[in-house]
Amino acid sequence: MFLLEVIFSFTLGKMHRSIKTFIALIILLASFACFAYYVSPVSAQPQHKYFNVTARQFAYEPGRIVVNEGDIVTIRLRSADVTHGFYIPELGVDETVSYGEEKIITIVADKVGKFKIRCSVTCGPLHPFMVGEFVVEKGGINIIFLGSTTILIVAGVLSFIIFSRRGKQVG
Amino acid sequence: MSKLSKTELICLLIIIGIVVVMPISFYIYEDVLRVNRAAAQPLEVHIFAWASENGGWQPNEIHLKLNVKTKFIILAMDTAHSLIIEELGIDTGPIPPGYRKEIEFIPSKEGVFTFYCGVLCSADHHFMTGKIIVER
Amino acid sequence: MVDGRASSLKNLLTSFISHRNEFDLTDIEFFRRIFKHRAFQWAVILPNLFIFVIVVISGFVGTPVGNMSFAVVFVWILWWFALMTVLTPLFSRLWCMICPLPAFGDWLQRRGFIKKEGGFRWFGLNKPWPAPLKNLWPVNFIFLFIATFIVLLTTRPVVTSILLLTLFVLGTVLALLFAKRAFCRYICPVGGFLGLYSMFASFEIRPKDRTLCERHVTKECVRGSDTSFGCPWLIYPGGLERNNFCGLCMECIKACPYNNLAVRIRRFAKDLLVKSGRALDEVYKAHIMLALALIYIAITQGPWGWLRDWGNVFYKPTYGFALSGIQGFAIHAAIVWSSSLIIVPGVFYLFCALSKYLAKGEGSTKNVFINFSYTLIPIGLAGWIGFSIPIILVNWSYILNVISDPLGWGWDLFGTKYIPWQPVLLEAIPYLQILAVIIGLIYSIKYGSEISKQVYQDERRAVGAFLPIAIFLILVSILFIWLFVG
């Protein structure tokens, strides 16, 4: 009960008007971004893409795989030295590959964004840093990056305008 | 130097406990564990593989304990043999005569199992069997 | 009763952002009593000393595998995340309050763990720190030296142990030679960036009534009293305006006969507007930290294997660039040092020169540079927080493994040794990182525009003159976002 009172007075009470303007604008922008994302048309026809990936201590070669939303990606995975993992939980990928082995992994890129490929098997000292990237774009654009950069620039410009207006010095 | 009050003495003992006693206790704990681990060395069983006409498996009845790590050391004596225990998932593959194969496993099921040779070694090859009894 | 609790909770929560409200912990009797208790500092250091001993031992005699080593997991996963994301932004130099490195030095100097007696004489030579070193340049260089080896440090337990033991011994030896916490102020590499980012923190110790301090001549807060040793951080609590050198040890709280010192929750980044104390040495620290944030994200969380190889001096690359380990490491060191000391400050300097041109200001670009560099603190801290978030969300399960088997000798004390590696909330990481960068940028610009009015007397020109700096901040933020999600 009194928690509600706290939240109410916290949001409507003594906060600076400009901070409230801010938060309102950020929420507005974020909702717009989500709406745009879901409403934007799916890109071109899903394609089949093929990659040869070698896992080695302590990186994947190539380190970055870029595909489009909806693509069906086949990865031929080998290891150059010891047993490594190839783990992208967001896309349901959890494989390991040992030296001399070859694994064929098929991924359907049904989510958009940059997903880190992590090594799930302790493969040496730098194992926690062994990271690759699997980027799923929409229409050839990494829209998470584009969207967040846009929100960032708008937030920066708005901050500049709003906070420059305040006449008195604070603090 | 002022004399050590009781509180200061307690503080000092706690610090010594952390900085000196605790590391030493690590080593003591490890030693205790080492004794226990030694007791848990795998149970070694030497098995001599003879063709059935020459006596068959020596021994041909083996008693094992459930969940205790076991090591079979199999020596193929007259011709190539292999040892298979289907229920425990053991298959040594062919062992040429004069060669030894070691296989470590943990029997996870109680009961009586048959083991046999999987390599065509002699005329009475199919009779080359033995019994493993896994009990608690 | 309920009303009182609600309003003080509201007070507490709004203190983090309010310009009018600050919540004084010493208003609460519990805090007043523990801060004044002589056993307080010894007691809070104790658990850390316990962990510290295990960390050092595990590096020397424990497993050499990084993610199974208590040293690497507790220092570079747990402590690093807690320090950057929780302890420093919320509670200023709280780590310094509980840090075990100066503990032995303190206890030796004070001839005891808890007590303070009358007629006290310091143990040790108690010399003043040499004047030419009374700045942050030693810290800057020591920190950069350690930072060059970050890949080795965070992956090979023995290197962590060597570093911590060296700092511990150094802290103790310096305490026997010099007065009070000379190590903490002028040598400790952690202290360098903690002091800087504590300016952003929502926590502070300040005098309640400065005029009272001015009238009060005996200054127990500095000199000590029957119940206190006086401030070991070589500052004057009655004149405290910034968090940078206050290690929250609470000696001043014990000393002040008027209870004139408050331990407060206050709005974030308040210290960024304090003009006194601004200096080139600490400003360089801000540039070093910004450069290193970008470099570390690229090396340890980026897909560029060749960049990672360069940081790993023992690696003989068979892929990528055909350089030897030493050649690659030399390039890595060159990148680290040049970007921290030359490239980032240099580029920022150009933006400052542009700013000064737009303001048609008098005075030096160097002055502009020093003042505006404080805007790098919120965005730099945001970058480090963004860097630390995946570290904890991906690797937290190692903490449980390592508690059961600290030395990697095959123990299983609490049954958690074989808990499988279990990253969590991976889908949320990019959004948390983006949020941190946006909030950091907003704070940087907000306080930057105020700093601009401090630097340039003409308020209207100050707005336009801040524009280049704002652009720099936005570009840096975009760089962070690109590293995180691009």
Image (cartoon, rainbow, N blue to C red):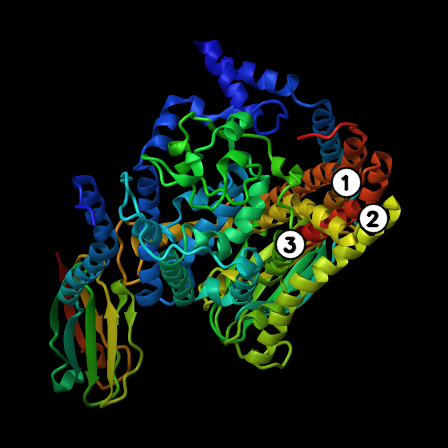
Residue under pointer 2: C355
Please tell me which of labels 2 and 3 falls first in the chain: 3
- Discs 3/1, front: 1
Q: Residue at x 21, y 51 (%)?
A: B17
Of the residues shown, which amino acid type is indicated by label 3? Leu
- Counting from the top left corner in percent of width and height, residue C313 is at 53, 74
Q: Is residue C437 left or right of residue A124?
A: right
Numbered disc 2: what chain? C
Pointer 3: what residue? C290
- The answer to whether residue C418 shows anywhere in this view is no
Residue C420 vs residue B22: left or right?
A: right
Name above or below for residue C193 compared with residue A73: above
Q: Name the residue under label 1.
A: C452
User: Which comes sooner in the sequence, label 2 or label 1?
Assistant: 2
Disc 2 to disc 1, C-alpha distance = 10 Å
Residue B90 locus on image (x, y percent)? 28, 69
Instruction: Decide which of tag 3 and tag 1 comes sooner along the chain.
Output: 3
**Amino acid on which the number 1 mark rests in the picture:** Ser
> In front here: C118 or C114?
C118
**Which residue is depicted at the point 66% across and 31% down?**
A171
Label pair 2/1, CB-CB below 8 angstroms: yes
User: Numbered disc 1: what chain?
Assistant: C
Q: Distance between the residues labelled 3 and 1?
A: 21 Å
Percent across and percent down for residue A3 are 51, 17
